Image: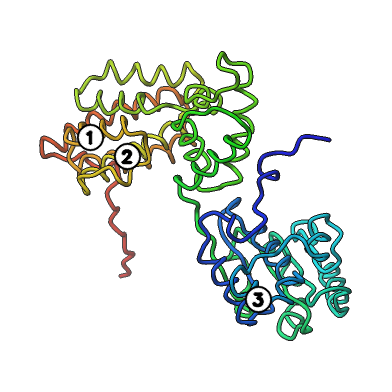
Amino acid sequence: MSYQVIARKYRPAKFSDITAQEHVTRTIQNSLRMGRVGHGYIFSGLRGVGKTTAARIFAKALNCQKLMDDPDYLQQVTEPCGECESCRDFDSGTSLNISEFDAASNNSVDDIRALRENVRYGPQKGKYRVYIIDEVHMLSIAAFNAFLKTLEEPPPHAIFIFATTELHKIPATISSRCQRFNFKRIPLEDIQKQLQLVCDAEHITVEGDALQLIGRKAQGSMRDAQSILDQVIAFSAENDHEGAISYQGVAELLNYIDDDTMFDVTDAVAAQNPAKMLDVAQFVIKNGYDEQDFLEKLVEHLRNFLVVQNLSSTRLVERPDAVRERYLQDAGNFTPLAVMQMVDFILQTQKELKFQFEYQFRFELALLKLIDIVHAVSSGTLPVATVPPPQKKKFLTTN
């Protein structure tokens, strides 16, 4: 049997397995208990946060025989049993009551017309026919218009679940006919906890800081985190500790610039040491790090300083404890105004670097400029903006 990736192997099979989307699962389960199931749903949110998974579990629960026959199970558990004929058909991929469409490749009017013709026929087993349309925002305007009447007055057995990462692209005429659920970005702690469960199940030793780094790289997407974990497991297979995953190994694989390098930048700024700043620039360039990515991480680094300065706490800083302590120690080296000035300059530099020649020199110059910015703020003279003065309007005069 071929290898099954972690994201598929550990895909949630019940509402309770879905991470950090309790506002969605609770509402759906309550609607099942009360018998108030709508005909149209829109699941929107970041990639990899559980939209399609929740749609599949919902579709499975709608036709679960135990939920229909056992009122106590419906009220107390409200999960697809996984044992009835309908659930087994769903798990094996042979259920005729659940249809999935990819709107990215089936986005024409003809595709929607075929779907409309299919909707007229009732379920062979169970109570509902459920249509899950993924990436629904990819449908053409004509296809959306062709779907309006069916969505407004669907057959009683038809339920539509739309999944999208771009809710704003769905016409208001469609979204107003559906119940909308916005899936949240998954918190770092929840991602780290889920990855730890996967590693325990796979009998893999892993450092907590390594999982935190994977979670930060995933930026709120559970699927991205699980895909990265697959890579890390393969990368760490030949190390000296029988496949143990270390922070250093993850940082090496992801080409991640560690926090020490970020602190080198702010240390050079605080000490007004241009030689040290140039060393940091050379380190980034020689090791092949992307300069834009480095500046993005530097903005995040400065954001952590602002959080500590305004809260006098590191509770919103997603870093290991040792790094948090260092933020507390170094926060007093800068004023909040100086940090905000540096952030503004870096954001502007990111835009300019895309269109500049002498890329290396511009990057070095940007880091050196940070020293001047903080020095100017501390001395009471903010750097002068390089915006040309407005030109006077010339008016034509007639004699």
In the image, residue 183 lies at what x, y percent?
54, 61
Q: Which mark is residue 174?
A: 3
Q: Which mark is residue 223?
A: none
Q: Which mark is residue 373?
A: 1
Label 2: element kind: helix
Work out how far the residue at label 3 is from the one at label 2, CA to CA, in angstroms: 42 Å
Specify the amino acid type for callout 3. Ile
Tell me, yes or no, whether the two marked residues, 1 and 2, touch with CB atoms within 8 Å: yes
In the image, residue 180 lies at what x, y percent?
58, 72
Residue of label 2: 345
Label 1: element kind: helix
Image point 26% across, 30% down: which residue?
326
* Comes first in the chain, label 3 or label 2: 3
Nearer the camera: disc 3 or disc 2: 3
Specify the amino acid type for callout 1. Ile
Work out how far the residue at label 3 is from the one at label 1, CA to CA, in angstroms: 50 Å
Displayed quadrant of residue 284: top left
Image point 66% across, 78% down: which residue?
71
In the displayed structure, would residue 365 be above or below residue 276? below
- Asked if residue 216 shows in the view, the reply is yes
In the image, residue 140 lies at what x, y percent?
73, 66
